[in-house]
Image (tube, rainbow, N blue to C red):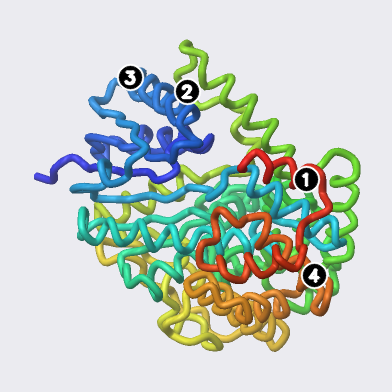
Amino acid sequence: MKKGIKIVTIGGGSSYTPELMEGFIKRYGELPVREIWLVDVEPGREKLKIVGDFAGRMWEKAGYPVRIHTTLDRREALPGADFVTTQFRVGQLSARIKDERIPDLHGMLGQETNGAGGILKAFRTIPVIGEIISDMRELCPDAWLINFTNPSGMVTEAAIRKFGWKKTIGLCNVPGIAEMREPENLGYRPGELTYQFAGLNHFHWHRVFAPDGREVTKELLEYINEENGGTPVNIFQTPFPKELLASMEMVPCGYHRYYYMEEEMLAHSMEEFQAGGTRAEQMLEVEKQLFALYQNTELKEKPEQLGKRGGAYYSDTACECISAIYNNKQSRMTVSTENRGAIACLPPEAIVEVTCLISARGAEPVAWGTFPPAQRGWLQMMKAMEECVIEAAVTGDYGLALNAFTLNPLIRSGREGKRVLDELLVAHEGYLPRFKEKIAQLKAEGIETDDEVVRSLIEKGL
């Protein structure tokens, strides 16, 4: 008989944690969790306490004998863990504010996982994943690492290829959103259509098949610009050109809007920025409301307001992945894992986001094959950019960081793009020890942002 499962969640003070708890509670019959450790850092102490108490109430109401532990010391939490999930944000939301405001001030998209902001998030996050893996190697060498820390694909690639933790699977809720919302457009229920995804995290396409095997991708493309077209709520839904879609014969993910319609998405971003701040600042207010709710001792279920954070279906994705491994289920899911030939135009060792069968062996990719020339070109360029980002994050190589900025289509190359990189490095100094020498040089040259909000955050040590 299998023993109960020990789960450790790094970033346990996140506002998303109640959704994760909901997923485990829903699956308790097949996933007998015995203890959950929620881990965070000192700046998140108060949120961790609030979330930990709320998680305890959720499990108490469910009636299952699961112990909830909270700690600021991950080494206390990790010994004997079966699964380690990661959902942390280095620097918390104040770091995201910097990631978004600084590019915005230079007339570039300041999105948290795409463009300059996404690259800086990777620079801050990848070294920390390396430290977590070092502790896991010592304290829970048989554990699976289930990562949904963004940018998920790059973080997963670093975990597997740079830090050697092969038992890593990267998750994202975007494929799940499509699978849950799109079928009703064609008169089906979720789960009745068969989906096949391929690409990179936040940069994938998919094809869809009816129960009788007939492909219905073209029919779904007719609905992509509508409310139930599968786009996450946190992405402005500017319309895709129908001719562009027809030439693909695949459904692009919502994040492709940032690349295919950069002009429109940038204009909307600038309007939001000038009217009331960045998406990060909006989320800061949503988080305040959520944590106020979480403190209510009468609250014992996930509140509906959590859906405003754009994290729909994270719990199902994460918990189903863990259950599929634990129960050897051969579940069909879309995750970030080694390519192994599934996408013909990328190296076999590259980390891709692709439909897989998930079992006790981990993720086994379903072959996609080839892409049309336009999509192949996008993929190869974006993978090259990701590889530069990962190497720069590990080594602190400024030249590679600048190469990544030059490759990224959402960042203008040349003097202005370099200026954005320099300002972001200085703004995030406390979380970028590998760039210490370069940051000291930039500060000596007088590099700083001219944004009062960012300067205020830096002065407060945030």
* Front: mark 3 or 1: 1
Q: Position of residue 237 (x, y in %)?
A: 80, 53
Query: Could you give the CA–CA distance between mark 3 and mark 1, rounded to whole angstroms?
Result: 38 Å
- Which residue is the site of mark 4? 260
Q: Amino acid at mark 1?
A: Thr
Name the mark on residue 301: 2
Seen from the viewer's position, the closer of residues 101 and 442 is: 442
- Which residue is the site of mark 1? 278
Query: Which structural element holds mark 1?
Result: loop
Answer left or right for 453 relative to 352.
right
Query: Which structural element holds mark 2?
Result: loop
| Above or below, comparing residue 355 to residue 112 in the picture | below
Answer left or right for 277 relative to 390.
right
Q: Amino acid at mark 2?
A: Glu
Residue at 56%, 53% (x, y): give it: 430
Name the mark on residue 60: 3
Query: Could you give the CA–CA distance between mark 1 and mark 4, rounded to whole angstroms?
Result: 21 Å
Q: Quadrant of the N terminus?
A: top left
